[in-house]
Image (cartoon, rainbow, N blue to C red):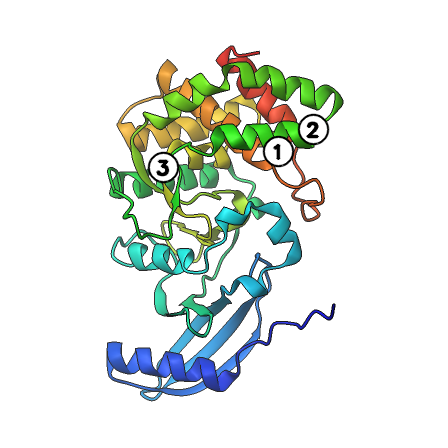
Amino acid sequence: MTVVPVQAPSSEELGRVLDAEMRRRWRVGVRSLARRPHPYRTSFPLEDLDVVLEDGRRLQLVFKDLRFEGLEDGAKLAKASWVHDSFREIEAYRLLAEADLGTPKLYASLADPKTGRYWLFIERIDGVPLWQVGERQVWEAAAVWLAGLHRRFLGVVRAPSSSLCAYDMGRSMPALRRAIQHASGRARHILERIGAGYENVVHRLQCLPHTLVHGDFYASNILVDRSRTPTRIAAADWEMAGIGPGLLDLASLVSGTWSATDRSAMVTAYANAAIGGPPKSQFLADLEGCMLHNAIQFLEVSPAWAPPPGQTHDWLAEAYSAAAELGIL
């Protein structure tokens, strides 16, 4: 079988979409458009666009082609089939456009099921991914920003027709069963032991307040712009955006090989901003439950998938640690 590569849209096509949106929004058209590959990789193709409007204004944008056909093979293996929805990130950016949270500004989007074109045109941030930043206070600032996102959308309800993920925990037990199927030896034994108490954890998470969650709030998806004061935190790549417990995002941010002091500082920064005080015991238990939930989501992934270089992580160890803290091992 011959695999036909996905054809990138022409500059003329991109220009027409942008021109129509700029004329609608600002009553000025596009004079010129230059494009080049974006320096960072994501699951979908990215390009940098330098746009000049007819009145001389210059826009620095990122173009993202969200067609499922353009998704890299590794990304297709890394996520369950239900995850893929080409409209989800567009919906997320449209929702964020009214929130003024410092996320990349939405300039234009196209969602055309008939042609299969799902395009995003967003602000290009002059920053670096959070993982390139060593100062803990910047990571704490990311935790505070995250609390602001969750406060802003606290209590939001997912519409039945929405493309946003429903983090309602309904897939949590099936995810654990798939993780057990993929595992063998010691790993399988650990996951089976977790399974004995995991349903109670899931029930507790289901009862937590729901908000808009990024769904993939890891350091590679958080941009830091130090050209501004205060430092701008800009979460990008909202492909997994959904409605669910906000602590799922905090669990993503503090995952990894942090010292207890560093992790506690980030958790405390979030709690102070989210609930107006330091984290209490139930808050910390709920966070451990979310860390266990996130780890299992990675462990259920197809064994044929391997993470990109530099992004490997021992999710089994993370699941074991969280389960031990919760007393279900």
Q: Earlier in the sequence, mark 3 or mark 1?
A: 3
User: In the picture shown, does residue 226 fall above or below 9?
Assistant: above
Looking at the rendering, in which quadrant would you find the C terminus? top right
Q: CA distance from mark 2 to mark 1?
A: 8 Å
Q: Residue placed at 57% from the left, 57% from the top?
A: 42
Q: Quadrant of residue 94?
A: bottom left
Q: Label 3: how many residues lie within 10 Å, few (<14), some (14-19) or many (20+)?
A: many
Where is residue 296? Give x, y as percent. Answer: 56, 30
Q: Which residue is mark 2?
A: 183
- Amino acid under label 3? Gly
User: In the picture shown, does residue 11 fall above or below 157?
Assistant: below
Evaluate if marks 3 and 2 touch, with contact meaning CB atoms under 8 Å apart.
no
Given residues 280 and 57, the one toward you in this image is: 280
Q: CA distance from mark 3 to mark 2?
A: 28 Å
Q: Which residue is mark 1?
A: 299
- Whether residue 255 appears in this view of the structure is no
Where is residue 308? Give x, y as percent. Answer: 68, 49
Q: Earlier in the sequence, mark 2 or mark 1?
A: 2
Left or right for 180, reference 212 = right
Evaluate if marks 2 and 1 touch, with contact meaning CB atoms under 8 Å apart.
yes
Q: CA distance from mark 3 to mark 1?
A: 20 Å
Where is residue 28? Give x, y as percent. Answer: 28, 85
- Amino acid under label 2? Ala
Looking at the rendering, in which quadrant would you find the N terminus? bottom right
Left or right for 260, reference 15 = right
Evaluate if marks 3 and 1 touch, with contact meaning CB atoms under 8 Å apart.
no
Q: Residue placed at 60% from the left, 53% from the top?
A: 76
Q: Which residue is mark 3?
A: 244
Left or right for 313, reference 124 = right
